[in-house]
Amino acid sequence: MIPEFKYLMEAPEKAFLGCRMATKEEIVAREFEDKQKLEPGDIKVFKSFKDGQPYFSVYARIVGTIDCSQDPSWLAAIEDSLKSKRGFEVLNATLADIAQLEPVARPYADWWQWSDRTEPTRRSFRPIPPIDQ
């Protein structure tokens, strides 16, 4: 078990092939991320063998959600998430909210990356993976 990831599923390799003749862990992970509009690295896939057949185990990053329009203490929740080193999504952040967010997130800039590629109303924060991964 990977601490910041949760187990999603395990299936034989042929369940992930589609129209390909073969697949790899990275391909399966990127396809899951693309379908679910996740950030790169949010899915980890491991290959194993059972009864001589290749199987893939799929794990998803545990991601919290912080809604700026619903949670009055959203800035404190963001700082707690940054300190706990868990990925999270910030929802419904206005331009004023983002301006407030900058000073809170700045001290963590060396360890975190953020992206708004999924939707204009969603900002994704993820820990930067170590170089050896």
Image (cartoon, rainbow, N blue to C red):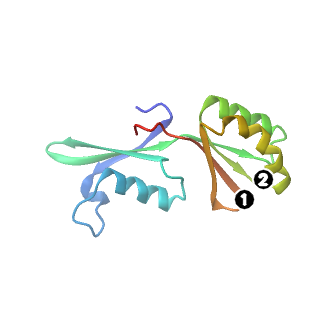
Work out whether 10 lies above or below 2.
Answer: below
Q: Which mark is residue 93?
A: 2
- At a point 73% along the width and 34% down the height, the residue shown is 79
- At a point 60% along the width and 33% down the height, the residue shown is 85
Residue 78 in picture, x, y percent from top left: 72, 38
Residue 103 in picture, x, y percent from top left: 79, 40
89 with respect to 14 (left or right): right
Q: How many marks?
A: 2
- Dot 2 alpha-carbon crowd within 10 angstroms: few under 14, some 14 to 19, many 20 or more: some
- At a point 36% along the width and 52% down the height, the residue shown is 26
- Indicate the quadrant containing the N terminus: top left, top right, bottom left or bottom right: top left
98 with respect to 125 (left or right): right
Amino acid type, residue under disc 1 in the picture: Thr
Amino acid type, residue under disc 2 in the picture: Ala
Mark 1 element type: loop
- In contact (CB < 8 Å): disc 2 and disc 1: yes
Mark 2 element type: loop
Q: Which residue is mark 1?
A: 121
- Dot 1 alpha-carbon crowd within 10 angstroms: few under 14, some 14 to 19, many 20 or more: few
Q: Does residue 69 show up?
A: no
Q: Nearer the viewer, residue 13 or 74?
A: 74
Q: Nearer the viewer, residue 96 or 15?
A: 96
- Indicate the quadrant containing the C terminus: top left, top right, bottom left or bottom right: top left
Determine the residue located farthest toward the left in the rendered image: 52
Determine the residue located farthest toward the bottom in the rendered image: 19
Q: Which mark is residue 39?
A: none
Q: Does residue 109 show up?
A: yes
Comes first in the chain, label 2 or label 1: 2
3D distance between C-alphas at marks 2 and 1? 6 Å
Residue 81 in picture, x, y percent from top left: 67, 34
